[in-house]
Image (cartoon, helix red, strand yellow):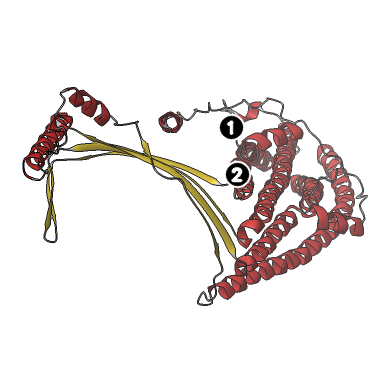
Amino acid sequence: MSRVVLNLLALGMLATPVVAQEPTPSIPQSLTLQDAIDLAYRHNPTLRQFANDIGPATWGVRNAYAAFVPRFTASGGIGYSGAGSQRFLSTEFVQSSGTVGSSYNLGLSLQLSGRSLMQPGVARANHAAAQAGITGAEINLESAVRGQYLAVKEAEAQLELQRLQLTRNEEFLRLAQARFDVGQNTLLDVRRAEVERGQSQVAVLRAEQTVTVEKLRMFETIGLPAPTDPSVVTFPDTFPVVAPPWELEALLSEADVENPDLIVLRAQEASANASERATKTDYLPSLSFSAGWSGFTQQFTNDQFLVASAQASADASVAQCQFANANWQNAGVPGPDCNLFAWDPAQADQIVADNQVFPFNFTAQPFSASVGISLPIFTQFSRPLQISEASARSEDAAEAVRALELSVRTGVSQNYYALQAAYTAIGIQETNRTAAQEGLRLATERYRLGSGTFFELLDAQLAAQQAEADYINAIYAYHRAIATLENAVGRPLR
């Protein structure tokens, strides 16, 4: 038994292994949308927080099933008591030698109740809820990455538009300077052209800054530090504009099954229902079983005290024997041999050897076991209270699911109609852009030929720039509408 105790103590001293931290990967210079999603799956902090919840949930399932296996405990200890005297009421107890002792206790215990029988189902529901949280977080993260990728592409498109406008203003400045050199206009046109070029240069700087900011937000969404120069990372993916091929009813059916928030909330509802069923089992009796093995040692620290006590006891026995032979025996009847009670010096070694029991030469105690059953009769209404609270949580979860189903249905329908309108707006804005570009071309030719004024040219330029900006906004409003619809449905649509 002492070997068992030593092995248990050794197991408790095992060191915990240290997990090496994964090195931070570098971001590829050409970052596709799929690359960004894959990196975000591995490094996004929010998703990793959800992933951390699956470990405790998994151990919760194992713990629930382990409730059907007896609990095993082992304990041990050592102690010391010094020499001296103690008084209890009118009696004084004297201990002439200090003692050291040790003990062990091994126990098995098992307790079964209705709640423990239902606990595996509760634990599985909690595990499913944790897994659903990870799935929902992955879908939401992918939607966030797609949206931010679109934001970068839109910022780059606006930058290209500003650079195109800067090129136009530089051309207008050369044209105004050429006409001024030949005396066909005034210096006012040249100065106005210079101002327009300067404003375009500022607009380009601001657009470049916007591209940098959107790239930084993309790196933050992924969960990795941004490069020192974000411009070295390019975003090569393009997104075509096609007529929306999806039907509303099909999207509503898919959203009812695949929406990440609905998945999470339904899993939480299942967990609440399982907890309610487990709480109702508190009216059932509980069964308990326990068994134990124990032992102890007690060793006097003063061996000579034991020897002296044994010798004194032997001498007292010899004296009593001699007194009995001299005074109590009948005449002519031989008495017992008093030498049988005499002290033998060889006994001292045996007494010393018998005293050497600390710390592992245990004296075993009798085995003990017990079985009991418990049935609470009156618990001051705590069981009805707990059941009522569990039922309320279950009903609240069901109503939350129903409310979210309505919200998801509204969101899918709203985003579907918004996508249709965004696609129609692209065609209108493309027509406006073509007309504005043609007007700018005509105004430029009129100014070059001297039949138009510079202010007419500026008005045409402003109209063309606005139409081109509106066209870009319509394009990316369409892409954002698809991304929003994908988020509402719960899966990529293209």
Q: Earlier in the sequence, mark 2 or mark 1?
A: 2
In which quadrant of the rendered image does the N terminus lie?
top left
| Residue receiving disc 2 | 59
Q: Residues within 10 Å of mark 2 (few under 14, many from 20)?
A: few
Image coordinates of residue 442 in percent, x first then y, are: 87, 43
Question: Front-most of 254 and 383?
Answer: 383
Question: Please, what secondary structure does the residue beneath circle 1 have?
Answer: loop
Q: Amino acid at mark 2?
A: Trp
Q: Is residue 222 above or below residue 405?
A: above
Q: Is residue 352 above or below residue 66?
A: above
For residue 56, say whether it is visible: yes
Question: Front-most of 430 and 484?
Answer: 484
Q: Is residue 203 above or below residue 110?
A: above
Q: Residues within 10 Å of mark 1 (few under 14, many from 20)?
A: some
In the figure, residue 184 lies in which quadrant?
top right
Question: Front-most of 327 and 323?
Answer: 327
Question: Please, what secondary structure does the residue beneath circle 2 have?
Answer: helix
Tell us which disc is closer to us: 2 or 1. 2
In which quadrant of the rendered image does the C terminus lie?
top right
Q: Is residue 456 left or right of residue 385?
A: right
The circle drawn on residue 257 is none
Q: Amino acid at mark 1?
A: Ala
Residue at image x 24%, y 31%? 355
| Residue receiving disc 1 | 226
Give the Cα distance between marks 2 and 1. Answer: 37 Å
Question: Front-most of 258 and 348?
Answer: 348
